[in-house]
Image (cartoon, coloured by chain):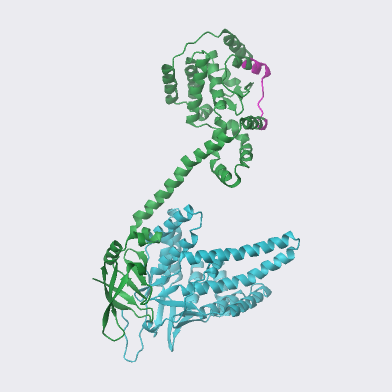
């Protein structure tokens, strides 16, 4: 038995009445027209509309013949009433939150954050992958050319010819036409543009000691090209924009968006995942060409030394050189032992290249 | 709470207004609204608005009974579509005239739209809004006449334009006198007696002092405006009356608004729900009602009105009605 305020919708008179929650409805002791007489009125759950402001106040409005409103400010009543009045009848979603209290609200906030995170880190990259797959290979080449012309490198023609001859000794498993270029700059770095334009700076060439190291470096860079890492990275960098594009224009302006980002290609940072993939693909290239896989490890030692020399290593930022990287390369070599043969032509070309760089 | 009747039937009435809504409940509603609006790409908006209003009204108490908002998302969605249709037609006409190289006609349509759509929206919004507001099951209502109001609005608007805005205070007061004067609370009738000259003087003083004091007087100006809004309103029922008084001082406004700002900044906006509930609580607590109306005797006189087109138009055009 609870008490509440009853309004008869005729006048704004507030009458205190007793109310009982029963099966399928409420039993109210409503005052009759005559003074002092009380008559029981039965309200069905199906004929009422509820308004829950918080967990201690509920308004129940009854439509139909004997319209009226009951207001109860009693948490105990609200609780009892809601037990009988099934949640499925609460058609207003926000009343669920009011019933649940702050915990529910915070839960929803967390849910929203989770939704955004999932969208950002799962759905968007997935869409970006699909978008990258759909782009034709000719697009890689165009993009690479744009990047080249927007950021021209001082090309050392003689050294580039030697590097190209060196690279020709290796069987590349790709449909792209690869171009190898030596740039005369004192930067200890190398990069690959989509479509197969690979640049090695003399600054890095000077640090390399064996032809195997150079072969490892080239196979790593070529792997970025064949695996289309630039396109993928670009797509995922701009994935939110791409998603909107895909939805609203069917991908029409997609290529345009990518082109406008071509200028940033040679400073593009790959994720560790892509670096690892390039390392492993590079190792496979070395194996297939019977080049000593240890060249990759030797290359990493050179890179690590560079890392120690410079306090703000430029190289490390684009190619994360962690112990982890050395470890999986070592493990991969152990798992896939391969015979290595001597490559006298490569050795000679390497020697000439070293001399040309000085 | 029962009122005390004296044998002659007069009531020593000082009904209290208070706001019982908790910030955390309101927060839950706002969050749910946000989530659903996000998921439905914004289509949930009318339902979100209904949920918000329902909570705010249900949390406001007068004399032991809560107010109620009976508007539904469905009504407001239909109204929203109609309002959108009206705005689209206007935009299309303006675009069509621009395309036909007669932008002058387009401008004319645009001006006519402002002059007619705004008052029609205010009228419709008031009809819907008050009809969907109840207290103890008794509906509020708006009895204004649309044509009369449009005429009044256009006249006041023209005078304001001709006087380069100086007439603004008078326009504002005359419109408010008309609108509030047509609001009914069951059989009770509201009145508003605003005076353009007084309102102008008050705002001029507030404006100048706020500049001189580098903004500090702004809080006192705010308190003056609030007092003006409240104290020129009356509720009449037969020969009985309720007067409204504001007890909010400039200092109290300063405390409220500064703390609100800090709350918003330090919670990175999450405290918005609490800021709003605090503000409403403050305003309700600072309104005093005094008079001899017996609230129990207010009778159901106003009809139900479920067309929310005006309400939605007013919302879209960002016109505040109360």
In the displayed orientation, state which residue is furthest to the bottom: B8
Instruction: Tell whether position A346 is magenta.
Output: no
Quadrant into which the C terminus of chain A falls = top right
Q: Magenta-highlighted stretch: main secondary structure?
A: helix
Q: Position of residue B274 (x, y in %)?
A: 41, 60
Q: Position of residue A32 (x, y in %)?
A: 30, 82
In the displayed orientation, state which residue is furthest to the right: B101
Q: Which chain is cyan?
A: B
Q: Is residue B241 above or below residue B270?
A: below
- The image quadrant of residue A54 is bottom left
Q: Which chain is green?
A: A
The magenta stretch is A149-163
Which residue: 34% across, 59% down?
A87
- The image quadrant of residue B169 is bottom right
Q: Relative to the observer, which residue lies in front, A188 or A34? A: A34
Which residue: 57% across, 15% down?
A170
Instruction: Tell whether position A161 is magenta.
Output: yes
């Amino acid at each position: 038995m609870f008490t509440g305020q009853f309004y008869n919708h005729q006048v704004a008179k507030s009458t205190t009445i007793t109310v009982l929650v029963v099966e399928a409805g409420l039993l109210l002791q409503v005052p009759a027209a005559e003074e002092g007489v009380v008559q029981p009125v039965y309200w069905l759950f199906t004929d009422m509309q509820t308004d829950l402001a918080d967990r201690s106040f509920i308004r129940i409005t009854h439509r139909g013949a004997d319209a009226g409103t009951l207001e109860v400010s009693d948490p105990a009543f609200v609780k009892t009433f809601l037990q009988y009045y099934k949640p499925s009848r609460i058609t207003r979603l926000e009343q669920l939150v009011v019933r649940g209290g702050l915990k529910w609200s915070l839960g929803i906030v967390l849910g929203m954050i989770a939704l955004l995170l999932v969208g950002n880190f799962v759905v968007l990259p997935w869409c970006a992958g699909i978008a990258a797959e759909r782009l034709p290979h000719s697009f890689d080449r165009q993009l690479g050319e744009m990047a080249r012309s927007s950021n021209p490198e001082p090309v050392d023609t003689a050294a580039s010819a030697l590097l190209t001859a060196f690279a020709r000794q290796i069987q590349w498993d790709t449909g792209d036409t690869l171009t190898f270029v030596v740039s005369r700059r004192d930067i200890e770095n190398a990069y690959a543009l989509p479509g197969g334009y690979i640049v090695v700076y003399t600054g890095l060439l000077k640090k390399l000691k064996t032809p195997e190291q150079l072969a490892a470096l080239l196979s790593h860079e070529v792997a970025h090209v064949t695996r289309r890492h630039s396109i993928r990275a670009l797509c995922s960098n701009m994935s939110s924009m791409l998603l909107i594009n895909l939805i609203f224009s069917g991908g029409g302006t997609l290529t345009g968006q990518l082109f406008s980002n071509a200028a940033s290609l040679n400073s593009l940072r790959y994720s560790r995942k892509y670096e690892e993939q390039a390392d492993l693909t590079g190792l496979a290239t070395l194996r297939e060409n019977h080049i000593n896989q240890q060249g990759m490890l030797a290359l990493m030692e050179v890179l690590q030394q560079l890392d120690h020399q410079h306090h703000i290593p430029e190289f490390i930022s684009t190619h994360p050189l962690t112990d982890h990287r050395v470890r999986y390369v070592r493990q991969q070599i152990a798992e896939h032992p391969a015979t290595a043969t001597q490559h006298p032509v490569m050795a000679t070309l390497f020697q000439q290249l070293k001399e040309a760089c000085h | 709470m029962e009122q005390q009747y004296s044998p002659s039937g007069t009531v020593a009435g000082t009904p209290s207004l208070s706001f019982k809504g908790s910030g955390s409940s309101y927060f839950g509603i706002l969050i749910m609204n946000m989530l659903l609006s996000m998921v439905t790409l914004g289509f949930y908006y009318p339902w979100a608005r209904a949920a918000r209003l329902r909570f705010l009204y249900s949390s406001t108490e007068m004399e032991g009974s809560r107010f109620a908002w009976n508007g539904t998302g469905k009504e407001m969605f239909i109204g929203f579509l109609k309002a959108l249709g009206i705005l689209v037609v206007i935009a299309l006409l303006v675009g069509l005239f621009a395309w036909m190289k007669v932008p002058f006609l387009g401008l004319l349509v645009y001006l006519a739209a402002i002059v007619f759509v705004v008052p029609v929206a205010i009228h419709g919004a008031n009809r819907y809004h008050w009809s969907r507001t109840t207290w103890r099951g008794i509906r509020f209502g708006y009895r204004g006449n649309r044509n009369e109001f449009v005429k009044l609005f256009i006249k006041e608007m023209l005078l304001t334009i001709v006087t380069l805005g100086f007439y603004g205070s008078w326009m504002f007061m005359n419109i408010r006198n008309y609108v509030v004067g047509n609001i009914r609370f069951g059989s009770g009738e509201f009145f508003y007696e605003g005076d353009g000259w007084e309102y102008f003087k008050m705002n001029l003083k507030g404006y100048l002092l706020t500049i001189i004091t580098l903004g500090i007087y702004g809080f006192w100006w705010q308190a003056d405006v609030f007092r003006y809004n409240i104290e020129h309103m009356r509720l009449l029922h037969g020969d009985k009356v309720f007067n409204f008084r504001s007890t909010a001082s400039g200092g109290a406004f300063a405390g409220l608004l500064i703390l609100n700002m800090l709350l918003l900044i330090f919670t990175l906006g999450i405290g918005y729900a609490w800021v709003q509930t605090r503000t409403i609580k403050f305003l309700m607590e600072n309104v005093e009602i005094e008079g001899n109306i017996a609230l129990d005797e207010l009778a159901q006189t106003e009809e139900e009105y479920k067309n929310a087109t005006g309400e939605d138009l007013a919302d879209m055009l960002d016109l505040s009605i109360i």
